[in-house]
Image (cartoon, rainbow, N blue to C red):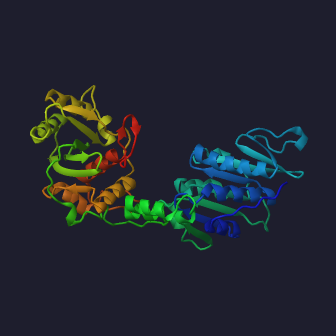
Amino acid sequence: MTKLEFKLFPSQHKVMQSDHNLTLLLCGRGVGKTVVGSHWVVRKIVKDNARGLIIAPIYSQTHELLERVKELLEQMCLTYVFNKQPPKSWGPAKLTNYNNVLSVRVGLTIKYVYVGTGDNSEAVRSKSIGWAVLDEAALLKEELFKKIILPALRGQGADYKYQLLFLTSPRGAANWISELSKKEGVQTFSAASSENFLEYPPDKIKWYKDNMGDLEFKQEILGLIVNASASAMFYNAEDKVFKQIPRPKDSVLYLSLDQNVSPMVGIVGWLIPHKNRIHVFDEIIIQDSANVIDFATLANKKLKNVVKGGEKLILCGDASGNSRSVTAKESFYKTFINNMIRNNYYIVDNTFKSNPPVFESAEKVNNLLANGSLTIDPNLKQLKLDLAKTRYTKDLTTDKKWHDPHAGDSLRYLIWRIAHRTIGGKNMGFYA
């Protein structure tokens, strides 16, 4: 076995030095969860005779950590096999099943590490382990931890020190990991992206600061737990963003819908693609229950003096409009588009197949409001109301019991679609 030496970032070093039973590392982007996790696992393999566990929410995340562990084992000249029984020269088989098992030969001893995912708890159930690494732990279910992983920590004797390492990005104050971080006996470290000064130098950190909402920056870059319960979702919707602006000649029109029966809501805005300027200048609302034909009729009435002949109108909106049947054969959007085409509109369908994440899309709105890239006509009463009243829940979703923001949701869809629009067949993003 070859001895290796590595330089670690401060938080990584603290994790490796921790002797607690439960150690939690809350990471900003680029801190290196996989690096410290793999070092921690390899040290356990070398020094601890108990069987261990590597687990993450999905296979690709588990696989990434496992591959890094394999690299370290190879660098240390330790022989291993994965997903199969070790060669007979290692000695008699000690397990009945080697699926998803990493077997490592350390001297004359065989060490075993179970490898699982959040949706494959059988890799852990009924096993006996002495230690575990939970990667992206906040995305794992608390029930998996309490009912499967904790009971598996057994069989090592009264004097054995069981240890768990949680590696994760914060996911809001309502997440079970956030609650765990407050408990006595859990050693918690927070690590900002700036620790990785090689990949996240000051100018890059500043770029993120300038291009993220405040809460998103705190969570994703500073690695902090964000408690936004009862906080305004659109906190940068200040008076200065509400203004009337004539439509420029080189702008592209967007219509964004929140597909709903009552009320039916949409907003209309224009984008100057190469200047990244967005202005929302109208809203289309039917307060009472209506059908898609009624809504298309109102949209036509609102837009007929705005949209020039042959000009494209880009349609975006929530995913439910693509699945809800309003006739025997057509979705809401299909019926709407066909009706608009019959009224001589050139519609480009950019509606969502799956909705954007609430927190990230709302924070994108906040970022653009703050830097002046997004403005809103002051006469849009429903949108102004939504921007003023919408709140986050503790888990960073929309508090619809307090206020259900259909126009605000339409704005999120609009901004997310523009931010992730495709140009020339490629996803160029908002800053293309």
Q: Position of residue 290 (x, y in %)?
A: 16, 40
Q: Give the total of numbered labels.
A: 0
User: Is residue 124 visible to the viewer in this orientation of the structure?
Assistant: no
Q: Tell me if residue 192 comes above or below residue 294 in the rendering.
A: below
Q: Tell me if residue 175 comes above or below residue 120 in the rendering.
A: below
User: Is residue 94 visible to the viewer in this orientation of the structure?
Assistant: yes
Rendered residue at 58%/69% (across/down) = 189
Residue farthest to the bottom? 184
Q: Nearer the viewer, residue 1 or 292?
A: 1
Q: Nearer the viewer, residue 31 or 380?
A: 31
Q: Tell me if residue 175 comes above or below residue 53 in the rendering.
A: below
Q: Position of residue 379 (x, y in %)?
A: 12, 56
Q: Position of residue 422 (x, y in %)?
A: 36, 39
Q: Is 214 left or right of 235, judged from the image as shown?
A: right
In which quadrant of the rendered view does residue 32 lie?
bottom right
Rendered residue at 24%/28% (across/down) = 327
Q: Position of residue 9 (x, y in %)?
A: 63, 65
Q: Tell me if residue 215 comes above or below residue 66 in the rendering.
A: below
In which quadrant of the rendered view does residue 86 lie?
top right
Rendered residue at 78%/60% (across/down) = 156
Q: Is 384 left or right of 89, judged from the image as shown?
A: left
Which quadrant is home to the N terminus? bottom right
Q: Is 386 left or right of 416, judged from the image as shown?
A: left
